């Protein structure tokens, strides 16, 4: 069941630009390049999961979302350890936190 809260987070997240500028512009030397690569891949994956869920496709969303949550948690841990510009860090943390909320909804 899709709660109004979930739909609100989902819609806001879709409108938010992903913090993947370095990856999308091929700046492989950027310190956040690998993280941006991983986020970009995960965005596509999560969008597919949610669209399937909304369409009523029969998949094991709990398992699929739980596996993706493990990776998202690792990113959050890595970001919290990383020394970087606080504004940039918050941009990543906010975006990834919304990803986490979406996945938690699918996992429950």
Image (cartoon, grey):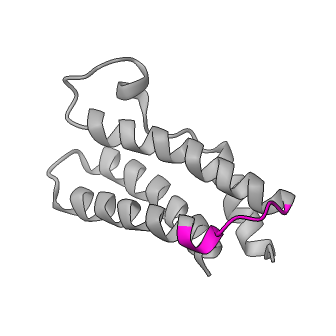
Which is nearer the eye, 31 or 63? 63
Which is nearer the eye, 83 or 49? 49
In the image, 66: left or right of 74? right
In the image, residue 33 sits, relative to residue 35, either above or below, namely above
Residue for point 76% across, 55% down = 52
Where residue 66 appears, x then y in whole percent?
A: 49, 71
Instruction: Confirm whether the magenta stretch covers residue 59.
Output: yes
Instruction: Confirm whether the magenta stretch covers residue 49.
Output: no
Please give the range of residues in magenta: 56-63
In the image, residue 97 sits, relative to residue 108, either above or below, namely above
Residue for point 38% across, 67% down = 70
User: How many numbered circles does the render carry?
Assistant: 0
Where residue 65 appears, x then y in whole percent?
A: 55, 66
In the image, 51: left or right of 86? right
Find the residue positioned furthest to the bottom.
108
- Looking at the rendered image, the quarter that the C terminus falls into is bottom right
């Amino acid at each position: 069941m899709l709660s109004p809260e979930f739909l609100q987070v989902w819609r806001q997240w879709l409108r938010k630009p992903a913090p993947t500028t370095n990856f999308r512009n091929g700046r492989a030397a950027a310190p956040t390049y690998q993280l941006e690569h991983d986020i970009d891949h995960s965005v596509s994956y999560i969008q597919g999961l949610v669209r399937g869920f909304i369409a009523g496709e029969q998949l094991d969303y709990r398992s699929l979302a739980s596996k993706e949550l493990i990776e998202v948690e690792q990113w959050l841990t890595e970001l919290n350890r990383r020394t970087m510009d606080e504004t940039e860090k918050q941009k990543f943390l906010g975006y990834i936190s919304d990803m986490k909320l979406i996945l938690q909804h699918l996992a429950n």
